[in-house]
Every structure is written in C-alpha cells, then in structure tokens.
Amino acid sequence: MSLLDYFRISKAGTASLAKERLQILVAHERSSRNQPSYLPQLQKELLEVIRKYVNVEQDAISVNFEQDENQETLELNIVLPDYHARNT
Amino acid sequence: MARIIVVTSGKGGVGKTTTSAAIAMGLAKKGHKTAVIDFDVGLRNLDLIMGCERRVVYDFVNVINGEASLNQALIRDKNCNLLYILPASQTRDKDALSQEGVGKILEELSKDFKYIVCDSPAGIEKGAHLAMYFADDAFVVTNPEVSSVRDSDRMLGILASKSRRAEQNEEPIKEYLLLSRYSPDRVKLGEMLSVDDVQEILSLHLLGVIPESKSVLNASNSGTPVILDEKSDAGQAYADIVARYLGEDKPHRFIDEKKGLFGKFFGSK
C-alpha cells in the first residue's frame, strides 16, 4: 500500500463519519423537538421526589414522550439499584 | 393566486440569495410573472446579486409602513420584464417587519404575480420566521457539510410546526432539497457527504444538485443571476431545478464526476 493509498483511506473515513454523527444527532434532535416543553422540568422534579425514598443515580430515570396519530404517551422508566433499594 | 416559495436553510452562506435570484429569474424566463423579496432587513444583498442595487428607492419596510406603494417599491428586472424585486430595508432593524404587514403585502402581490420567492435571512429569528410563515413551498438549500445539514433539519422542524399552514391545520408546506456547492470528485474520495447521504438523513425530495462552481462568484461579481450563464454548470443546474419544479421530467445531473472531453471543454475547473 502506497502512502497515497493510506491518505485516501483515512480521508474516506471522514464523510462516513460525518454521516454517522449526523444520523445520531438528527435523530436525537428530532425526538426532542416534538416533546412538550415541560419535560425536562418534570424529569428533574420526579428525580427529586424519588430520591427522597430511593438512592438512585441521576440517569436512572428516563422520561419519554411519544406521539402518534391517536394518542400521546408519557413513559416513565426508573431503574432501581437492586442492592441499595433494599437498604435505604 | 400566487404560489409562495421560501428559500431557506437556517445556516448562513450556503447559497440562499444565489438560489433565490436564480430560481426567480428562471421562473420569470419561463413566462411566469414572478416577484422576489429580500427578507434580510439590515443586511440586504439580493439587490446586489440581481444587479439592481443602484435602482433601490423604496423598500419592503417602506411599503409595510405605508410610506410607499408596492408599485413604487418593486424594481423591474433589467434582463426580464416578468421579474420584479422587492428589496429589504438596509437601515431599519429586523423588528421593522410584522406578520400582519408581511401578510398584507404577500396578499396584494398574490393578485398580480404567479410566483413569489421569499429570500430568507440566515438563522431562525424574526426575518427567517416571516419569510417562511406564509409559504406554500420551501426550497431548503443545504451544503454537503455537517452544520448545514443539521441546521436544515432544524429548519424543517420549524416549517412543520410554526408556519401558517401548520397553525391552521392546512396541507403542510411542500419541502424540497437543493444541495449546493457539491463536489462529485470529493464525494468519490469519501471526503464529502454524498447526495444520497444527505437525502437519507433529511428524507427530503431532491429538486436538484448545484455543483461547486466558479460561475457563481462570476455571476455575483457582475450582478447577474447565475441561471443566465447558460453555459455554466451551476446555471444549468438551476435551470433544471426550475424545470423540475414546474413539473418537467429532467434527469439529475452534476452528481457524478465530470469525465472525458466534455468535462475538459465545458467543466468549470
């Protein structure tokens, strides 16, 4: 493999890298675009309430808002730590 | 009734004004009475690209404020008598535009014109919002580059939720992708996002690819829309875009590398 080929291959990576990064970013931004504006605040307050009783991590809660033609669904997912949950 | 087209992108410098000038000229050349409006209050440039900067007397804001009539403010293009330019105000700040005022002007223009092309400023502030608010069709100008693609996607979200059509639950704005500054050579080398990549990410109907071309700077230097440079690749790309928009069946060009003699004689590089 010549030096030129090496450069060619390393460059070949950048467009596909761009595509990959964009796909992830755009998917993320699209999903948050349709969410109601109160969602981050809701997530924060829920976390505070749950933490009064269970010692959970910051990222132990996920709040998902989904929308289709017929209904809007608010999905709340809390992962409890199995060890601490019993001891607090 | 006129059809209102917004030329938008979110990101600056991708070719909105170049595109607005080219497609407005293209539509007029095809025999449709067309008006092109600069929404970039405070940073107007459409007049310069159209080569009518010395003929601006009244502007968009003057008409909204009732200081001039629409007929006084509209500038007839020197190359095509079916094309009129409504320049933006250079001196006022961007709050000078109001939704009500813009709506009134578009309604008045609609009586007389077949197409109204709204050249949006960059960003998602008031000027950009008003440029797209009343639109029927959106030409989303995108460069094959990460920040431009991302901003275009953001703009698509705004078109789908904040436009008049969205607010009034009408049929949504028709969105078209115009991929500009495209270099097939660099795509082949894997250095640039391909047209398929961009389409896959944005899932938009492709109206045309405009290749990176020296003719664009030449055109803006001389104040003639690049579509009038019929020998240039960018000029032909815009002519194809206008034809496709009007329903003609034109195969896509400028997606593959230039090759052989044809490229050597007619290529821009």
Image (cartoon, grey):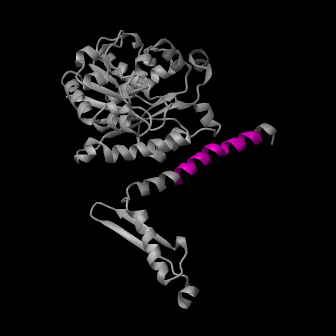
Q: Where does residue A48 sit, x and y in percent of width and height?
A: 46, 74
Residue at point 60%, 24% (across, down) = B259
**Closer-to-camera residue (A85/B36):** A85
Residue A13 colored in magenta in the image: yes
Dominant SS type (magenta): helix
**Closer-to-camera residue (B249/B188):** B188
Residue at point 55%, 31% (across, down) = B256
Query: How many circles with numbers are drawn on the protein?
Result: 0
Residue at point 49%, 16% (across, down) = B219
Compared to residue B186, the image places residue A19 above or below, namely below
Q: Is residue B248 visible?
A: no
**Closer-to-camera residue (B47/B249):** B47
The outermost residue toward the bottom is: A87
**Closer-to-camera residue (A19/B261):** A19
Q: Where does residue B249 sit, x and y in percent of width and height?
A: 36, 29
- Part of the protein shown in magenta: A5-24
Q: Where does residue B113 sit, x and y in percent of width and height?
A: 23, 22
In this picture, residue B171 sits left or right of residue B253: left
The outermost residue toward the right is: A2
Residue A67 colored in magenta in the image: no
Compared to residue A18, the image places residue B48 above or below, namely above
Compared to residue A52, the image places residue B112 above or below, namely above
Quarter that holds the N terminus of chain B: top left
Q: Where does residue B117 sit, x and y in percent of width and height?
A: 33, 27
Quarter that holds the C terminus of chain B: top right
Q: Is residue B59 visible?
A: yes
